[in-house]
Amino acid sequence: MKRYIDNAADWLSVINVAVLLVFLVVPIVVMIGMSFDGREYMGGFPPSQFSVRWYVSFFSDAYYLRGLSTSLLLAVIATVVSTTAGVSAALALDRYSGPGKQALESLFISPLVVPAVVIGFALLLFFAMIGISDGFTRLVGGHIIITFPYTVRTTLAGLVGIRKTLTEAAMSLGANERQAFWDVTFPLARTGIVAGAVFAFAFSMDDVAVSLFLTSPDSYTLPVAMVSMMRTNFDLTIAAAAVVLMIFTFTLILILDWTIGLDRLIGKGVFRS
Amino acid sequence: MSTTKRTVLLLLPGFALFLAFLALPLANVVDESFRFFEPGRIGSAKDAPYTLLNYAEILEPAYLRYFAETFRFGVLSSLIAIVVSFPIAYSVARQRSPWLRKLAIGFFVGMMFLSTLVRVYALQLTFGSTGYAHFLAGVLNVSPNSRFYTELIVVFGLLHYLIPISVITLLGTIQNLNPRLIEASQVLGASRLRSHLSITLPLCVPGLLSAFLICFTLCLSAFVIPMVLGKGKVLFVSNLIYARFSEIADYPSGSAVAITMLIIALIAIYGITWLVAKGFSNQDRGRSS
């Protein structure tokens, strides 16, 4: 009886994994397949003819290209600004141990708690009130605030592991505080900083909810361009655009794995050495 | 330079960003939410009188429907997500082959990072009219144009987004569970299923609850998924806020909905923090005993 129940449970768990893999992977496969569709009409999956014309159409469409270049520029600016501010805030929080430390920390993480639509809506009203109507400036503001908490959090997590004695040792061996920081603390904290920057870049590239409120006709991101095409258009250029966006995401994950290691990011838990 | 002065200087840029792009805009939304709105304007007038009307409106059935819909989809999808993810997270956490473990973690992290828009479009192609809509609708014996089918696809969209996140979240919980406890119960004669039900599950309750709440808050703020996959038939609170901006420019009402949504999200997140704190003290007990 015991073995019978365990076998049934094993089978159930195998079926669960199989169904889940199909559910998660098949849509992606369908999308990649359809992006290489060579037919003249919108047909079913799998395509009977293959071509790269949707990619040609994506890379020659000024509307998408403008979105892509705005997205990349925006992601770079947002990542640089929020990483700089985030690292400096994390350094201060790590050293500081007075009253209100916890409160300051949750204050800096708080943009994560506010739903993206609420941030977008609030920034729209705020920029209108102070008279900023330039789309790109508004987008920069929005993307900085949604990426900032990630950089604070990962840097802080990276700094916690560094023992104070190491800096003290460097200083007792004659380094001044600046040397101790650049030669000891910074290299050790680098993984946390890189992880934060990669997260920031990824979330900036992905955002729709905040950007949709802040775009203007001449400043829009690639995801916003894709959303508006999805509503009106039924050609497969969107599939090609989605595959391009996906390649960016997976490149970022590879960078994350090379620099930090996904295992270290997730942690192995207390009961594994 | 004194230490305090340097700390203040280091905190300054982050604090300025917080103030300019979050605190002040939100304060402005709170103010706007109490303003009287004249139909036909864009936003409220500069000296519009204060009123509670925008909040009273939310209690009307037409508005409550959006909240009810968001909650219904959120609870249902989060429940399915954690039930499906738990056994998977368990087998990844206890995976002996380092190669398989890395592959599985890489897969779920990759799926987690996948752009929401890419996900939504892939699901639309797969389950839309050119994809397997007729097949799936045929199996379920419904029309691909029915409301039920649209709702199903929205749930699929939410699950595609939530499952990788809950697997990764639960992985952390399970890894911190002492495997000796399960071994002990099996040595004492329990079946594997029984020992999981009476030991693993109860010890994971705080982790499961916080995974549920994480999923639920993500559903609350989901925006692109209902917008694209819901085809106008399924609308969440976030879509209502967007409509207040893009369709009728009733900013005061949009503000009141936004503040209400923010308060609900804060309550859910406060719940998570509390549960996580509780979970840690539980685990300490499990470890020392």
Image (cartoon, helix red, strand yellow):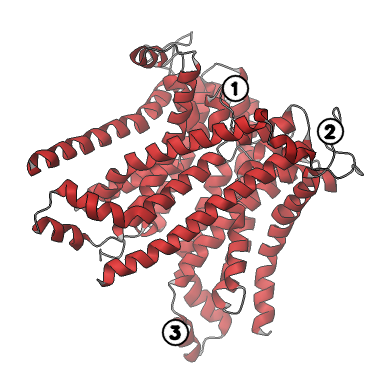
| Label 2 sits on residue | B42
Q: Left or right: where does residue B121 sit relative to residue B181?
A: right
Point out which mark residue B232 bears: 1
Q: Position of residue B73 (x, y in %)?
A: 49, 33
Which chain is disc 3 placed on? A
Q: Give the spatial CA distance, label 2 vs label 3.
A: 59 Å
Residue A88 visible? The answer is no
Residue drawn at point x = 76 percent, y = 55 percent:
B24
Q: Give the spatial CA distance, label 1 vs label 3.
A: 59 Å
Quadrant (top left, top right, bottom left, bottom right) of the N terminus of chain A: top left
Q: Are marks 1 and 3 on the same chain?
A: no
Which chain is disc 1 placed on? B
Q: Is residue A40 above or below residue B149?
A: above
Q: Which element type, helix, strand or loop, lies under badge 1?
A: loop
Q: Which element type, helix, strand or loop, lies under badge 3?
A: helix
Q: Give the spatial CA distance, label 1 vs label 2.
A: 24 Å
Label 1 with label 3: CB-CB less than 8 Å = no
Q: Quadrant of residue B245?
A: top right
Pointer 1 or 2: first along the chain: 2
Q: Residues within 10 Å of mark 1 (few under 14, many from 20)?
A: few
Q: Position of residue B43 (x, y in %)?
A: 83, 36
Q: Are marks 2 and 3 on the same chain?
A: no
Label 1 with label 2: CB-CB less than 8 Å = no
Q: Amino acid at mark 2?
A: Ile
Residue drawn at point x = 34 percent, y = 56 percent:
B173
| Label 3 sits on residue | A165
